[in-house]
């Protein structure tokens, strides 16, 4: 039987102090946060780590790091400012 692998993702989000509302093709949309970090680990059936991935993303909408998120994640405003733009960051996946 072939061995099965599993990929686990962890997403960290920055939340806005105020929701961001906009109109998209005639439909009102509301963002409350955006992804600022993606982490992943690939494991085999025996839980052996085969590979890892981590990237910081630069937010486009909620650019100021919310104080609670900083406390929980340990990230700083400088980490956000140095992050990859989301398009390039997702291409690295």
Image (cartoon, rainbow, N blue to C red):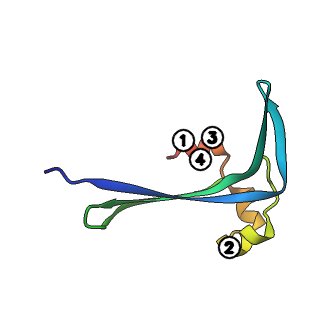
Q: Are marks 1 and 4 in contact (CB under 8 Å)?
A: yes
Can see residue 63? Answer: yes
| Disc nearer the start of the sequence (2/4) | 2
What secondary structure is marked by label 4? helix
- How far is the residue under mark 1 from the one under mark 4? 5 Å
- How far is the residue under mark 2 from the one under mark 4? 22 Å
Which residue appears at 79% of the width and 47% of the height? Answer: 61
- How far is the residue under mark 1 from the one under mark 3? 6 Å
Please tell me whether mark 1 or mark 2 is closer to you in this view. 2
Q: Are marks 1 and 3 in contact (CB under 8 Å)?
A: yes
Q: Is residue 24 left or right of residue 13?
A: right
Which residue appears at 72% of the width and 75% of the height? Answer: 71
- Label 4 neighbourhood size at 10 Å, few (<14), some (14-19), many (20+)? some
Q: Are marks 4 and 3 in contact (CB under 8 Å)?
A: yes
Q: Which residue is mark 3?
A: 87
Please tell me whether mark 2 or mark 3 is closer to you in this view. 2
| Disc nearer the start of the sequence (2/3) | 2
- How far is the residue under mark 4 from the one under mark 3? 5 Å
Which residue appears at 63% of the width and 40% of the height? Answer: 87
Q: Which residue is mark 1?
A: 91
Q: Which residue is mark 4?
A: 89
């Amino acid at each position: 039987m072939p061995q099965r692998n599993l990929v686990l993702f962890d997403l960290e989000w920055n939340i806005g102090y105020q929701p961001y509302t906009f109109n998209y093709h005639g439909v009102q949309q509301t963002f409350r946060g955006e992804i600022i970090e993606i982490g992943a680990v690939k494991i085999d059936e025996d839980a052996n780590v085969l590979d890892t991935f981590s990237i910081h993303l630069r937010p486009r909408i909620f650019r100021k790091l919310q104080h609670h998120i900083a406390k929980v994640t340990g990230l700083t405003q400088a980490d956000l400012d140095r992050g990859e733009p989301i398009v390039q960051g997702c291409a690295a996946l």
